[in-house]
Amino acid sequence: MTRCLLSTLALPAAALLLAVGCQQGIPLPEPSTEGIVRHRDDFLGKDVQVRGVVKKLVKCPQPPPVEPLDVVEEGQESDAWAPPPRPPRTCDPPPHAYLVDKDAVSDRELLVYGSMWSPLADLELGQEVTLDGRFDIVSKDGVFLRQAGLVVLEDLPAPAPPAAPEADAGPTP
């Protein structure tokens, strides 16, 4: 009897809590790795934000540093700007990580896949992160297929050149 009463009260109480939270501007909790994996059908094909701790991490090896070319003669300034070289986009095995909840109550891990041009490049083992990506079963390039689901990260834009200083044009005629 008590169990039946609790289950009939749970739904209206949750709806009331959700309605009051939305009206009061109280932020709802972010989806956890456990929540996304457990309710994967609700998140499939959607952009998600997930918070977790990096449990496993695979990255591409760093390329050797490239020394800049000196094409400007001494005493002269150059307006040329070249972005630093980017690491290779992919490697074998492809870059990926597994996230778990901070208070790891379960053994569920969420696979996060991206290139070395995505936020994945900045991750470290044991780091608590919040990532934005698309939740799906297959990665865009078909490298990963996971029935429990995976989060695919988008590449970050290339670094923009520094803004050119504004020249004092003087009065316009």
Image (tube, rainbow, N blue to C red):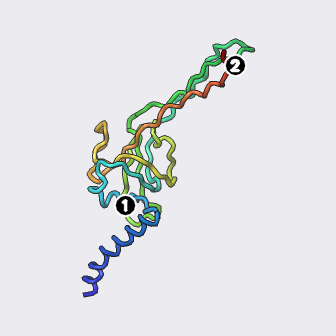
Residue at 27% over, 83% down: 5
Q: Which residue is mark 1?
A: 34
Q: Write down the quadrant of residue 60 in the picture.
A: top left
Kind of residue at disc 1? Glu
**x, y percent for residue 163:** 61, 28
Location of the N terminus by quadrant is bottom left
Is residue 11 visible in this depiction of the protein? yes
How far separated are the C-alphas under marks 2 and 1? 63 Å
Please tell me whether residue 116 is drawn above or below residue 2 in the rendered image: above
Report the front residue among 26 and 8: 26
**x, y percent for residue 137:** 28, 47
Q: Write down the quadrant of residue 165 in the picture.
A: top right
Which residue is situated farthest in the right direction here?
75
Q: Which residue is mark 2?
A: 171
**x, y percent for residue 159:** 53, 31
Kind of residue at disc 2? Pro
